[in-house]
Image (cartoon, rainbow, N blue to C red):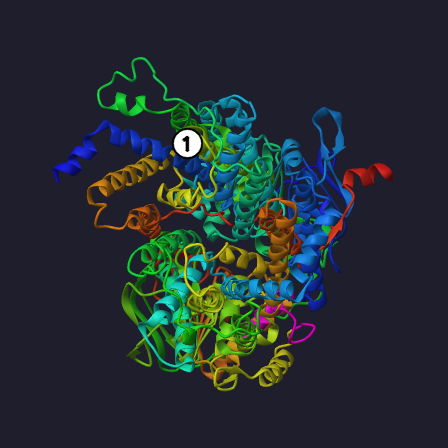
Amino acid sequence: MSDIIDILLSANFWAAALRIATPLIFGVIGALICERAGVLNLGIEGIFTAGAMAGWMAVWLGAGLWGGVLVAALAGGFFGLIHAILTVPLGLSQHVSGIGVTLFATSLSYFIYRTALPDVSSPPRIEAFKPLDIPGLSDLPFIGPALFQQTPLTFFALALVIGTAYVLYRTPLGLAIQAVGDNPSAVESQGLSVYGLRIGAVVGGSAIMALGGAFLTMSAFDAFFFGMVNGRGWICIALTVFASWRPGKALIGALLFGAFDAFQVRLQTEVGSFVPGQVFLMMPYLLSIAALVVVARRADYPRALLVPYFRGQR
Amino acid sequence: MIRFEPRGPVSLPRMIGVSVAAAVVALVLAAIPMLFAGLSVFGAYGLMVKGAFGSLFAFTEMLTRASPLILTGLAAAVAFRAKLWNIGAEGQLYAGALAAVAVGTGWVSGPSYVLIPAVVLAGALAGGLVMLGPTLLKTRLGVDEVVTTLLLNFVTILFVQMMLEGPMKDPMGMGWPQSEPILDEAALPKLMDRMRIHFGLIIALLSSLAVYFLLKRTVWGFEIRAVGENAAAARHAGIPVTATFVRVGLLSGALAGLAGVGEVAGLKGYLTADLSPGFGYSGIVVAMLAGLSPIGVVFAALFIASIFVGADSMSRATGVSNYLADLIVAMALLCVLVSGLFLRFRIRFVGAPAAKEAAE
Amino acid sequence: MTEPTRDTALVLKLEGITKRFGALTANDGITLDLRKGEILALLGENGAGKTTLMNILFGHYVADEGRVMVSDGAKGVRELEPGSPHAALEAGIGMVHQHFTLAENLSALDNILLGTERLASVRSARAPARQKLQDLMKRSGLTVNLDMRVSQLSVGEKQRVEILKALYRDARVLVLDEPTAVLTPQESDTLFAILKKLSAEGLGIIFISHKLAEVIASSHRVAVLRGGAKVADLATADCDRRQLAELMVGHAISETAREPGTPGATLFSLNTVSAGSGRDALRDVTLDLKSGEILGIAGVSGNGQTMLARVISGLEPLKAGEMQLDGKALAASDARSMIDMGFARIPEDRHHDGIVGAMSVSENLAIEAIRKPENQRFGLLRFADMASRAKEMIKAYDIRCQSEDSPARLLSGGNIQKIVLARTLETEPRVVLAAQPSRGLDVGATSEVHRRLLDARARGAGVILISEDLDELMRLSDRIAVIHRGELSSADPAETLDRGTLGLRMAGHSTEDAA
């Protein structure tokens, strides 16, 4: 028992939780923006992979780290645009299109990686983001050490949560996005473009998702591996429901998730000898399902989610 | 300006035409990554055709690859018909394979006519049970099945790994995480000497006919179609919507489980955690290419299988990554999705009204 | 009413508008004009092309031929860019759709502001907007709580938000599509009083309606559409109800009405039933239905009639109370059991709940009885029998379709309703639940529906008719009860009721208040 409390009180533990949470924050914020506009984006898993590969490869080819981040976002936006065109003006199944985008983005990333690096035995490494030492912040007790171990991308993710919340609740654009996910004809009857808003939200949301992938290859690790996304995208879709499509709750959800994951990794070192490792590896997925079940009854889905809009049709 | 005008009933030739067109467009688009990888497009396709159809061995290899794809394709098709989004065929396939190995490696013994049905049934049951969870979560609690089935893929595969490194590990496996081999009596018979093609193909073809018959001719099939096309109206008309979802979930999972049975009991002979190169996900493409038709699934699976087998062979000859196959398959899915518009709508390109005014 | 003189400035002119959907000509060369301060009623029955015309005006559709001219302040008139709601709004045209176009997850204020600010603005300027709206509300009498989420507002309040949306943008033309469909008679009177006030201030108003009374009472001029063409354009003062009715339908109308009947014993009853939650919940509803009578349920939409229909259809579990058939409590009340006990259920949203559009007419006719022996044997469908029965029903109910194999979605609304009538009434049900059975249907289809309901009554069935159309209720019902906020009044004989009394009850006033 005291072991558990020790874990929970250590700054290292919270640093790990925040690190695990970072890609999820990007993913959930991205998914939330798409879904608030009424489009489920199951392309997220592939967009993570594309962001991870593109960002890493840009840096490996000589771009700066922030250049890599930009390339990752552009890659995400590209796949988001495909999903947006298929689901918004063409009104095709968001489920199938999303799966298609995931398969496409994943296979294209793998193919490009393999074609660019046909015969490397171990994945080449880049100089990844370093932890950021912000004077003043790092000196804070407890929080300081937890934050001190984070790279700039984590701070970027935290800023993004605040920025998204502000845009969504305080600006005309955010209100329009909320409206288009609730009742597109409300938007059209006020002279705004339903397609424009939805396509924009999906492209923007996808670009943000891709940063979650970029974090993996440019911050958490320094190389690209096949299968490294490993379901994180799907977990984000579950967390988005858990977060009731709110940026603040998205942050809390991702942190809780990170904490659980960090905790079970530490628990594993304690009891790992008599519990198979796979049990721990299953935890994130089971946890996501549990999160969905917990909120299922009161989940307040955006009313127009999954419903295509055709002009003049009411 | 583009205008969509709804069409009347869809004719069979048009349905087939649309799917073939989508496949062709995907193959044409694949020229771009081929050129990027420095391949000659015609040369590469030549190698792929040869790799999938060039010899009896190549052809039987393609059929062998098609068997699990038919089954996962059927799993997706029957579920999607009811708008039950089972994206978990990959996990259900592993569950089926695990059950087949559990039953077929000595846990029960007996002659072939007992063991083979036992193995097949166990696999189907296991696949169905894995899908039962998400189905019940959907019908009872309203939990979206897309995410739960996707997540369960990871859980199931980890569970298989755990079993293969633990209780089901082959003591003679030189430390590799693999199961004991399936007993000869439990193995599906080969269809041809010196070829790998096995009875799993027959199971797949029979399943396709059975699903066709179910959907077309039976009350259950009627109810599945009604629920899938308009669940609210089906419920209003007194159709047992929840029971229908449960039936569909069990059937869909069972079909995916059968794919796993074929792979271990027909092809590999033992279970490893890399049994499936994504058959579950490719099944979605197969189902969509087939327009969710159970008979169409067979042809779509043959197409996808030839891409995979052909690309493997092309990859060996040229050194270009066989991820090209996955890329073509993914593009085929996106293409067939778009081409589906031509089924439901007559698409007219009309001049912008302003331009028309100016012309007058 | 005083009519604006002919030389008042033109604010809007539609010239030769034609719109085709496939083989259907929804609008056929319609020309129409509107002057400053004028209230124009656009009269026509369902399917006459009124809504299509207004959707073209507002840019939701593009006309195949013709153009829309709008006044441009001092500069005279100019052509409105087709197909752009944005351009229509810019030109000062505001539209209140029949189905409200409001985002329920935003406040009334944010809904009004939507689209009026640059999307790139870093902050939504709510304070000055609130000021302007307070003035507008004071001037027009359209009061609403601006900070409340739209999902919390009543139907009448939502309509006020819709009108405020237009006024906030300084509309010169206001179009309202069937504005009174969702209001009580009293609320309708208030609305028209406000519209008159607004028109006196110079606003040009077009309201779409098929209700003769309000057209005559509240418009300066009336344009009648029939079959997509304009058949009359008259000063309202010069025409009477009968003349308008004939113009609208194209022939003299013979309205279906019931003969006096002798209701039998109590057949079906609800005892203190509660169900659902939120706005549409039912609270302690008690109702008894006799055989051989039509029991009308009046009410403003959103007061629980949908839930009442769902309960009787077997789609909603009861939270309290019970349902009785022949004095015995129902053992089960799921959809299947209700059908098997002899309930015919005609859903209010026939496209959504009535048919499976992708399935054939024949399959839709068999769907409620698909497990009955006539449709299956050993779980196998009996197609030939299904088809021959479908052919008979298609004939008996005059369902217009290419064949029994055509997908049901290709049929018109009236024919879809006939499918529902055929499959539910063919089994000679004991209880018929008809929820908004004539909504959206033309006169022919409506009288067919009424005839079928009266036939069922004559046969001895009990009919529950839920409707928002008071004329329909008064003509068909033996007794009428009113539903308000989920509570059902006692049912009184139709002869003892008039529109005023019903209207007050629909607004929640008790009988004593009305007296």
Q: Which residue is mark 1?
A: A221
Seen in the picture, residue B263 relative to A22 is either above or below; the reply is: below
**Which quadrant would residue A22 be assigned to in this image?**
top left
Residue C363 seen in render: yes
Seen in the picture, residue B56 relative to A248 is either above or below; the reply is: below
* Residue for point 35% across, 48% down: A285
Amino acid type indicated by mark 1: Phe
Helix, strand or loop at disc 1?
loop
Magenta-span inclusion, residue B195: no
Tell me which segment is drawn in magenta. C400-421
Q: Which quarter of the rendered picture does the N terminus of chain C lie within?
A: top right
**Residue projecting furthest to the right:** B360
Residue A130 position in % (x across, y down): 39, 22
In this rendering, position of residue A98 left or right of residue A254: right
Seen in the picture, residue C212 relative to B350 is either above or below; the reply is: below
Residue C350 position in % (x across, y down): 53, 64
* Residue for point 65% across, 46% down: B318
The residue lying toward the viewer, choosing from B178 and C182, is B178
Residue C251 position in % (x across, y down): 71, 66
**Which quadrant would residue A139 be assigned to in this image?**
top left
**Residue projecting furthest to the left:** A2
Seen in the picture, residue A76 relative to A276 is either above or below; the reply is: above
* Residue for point 31% across, 40% down: A257
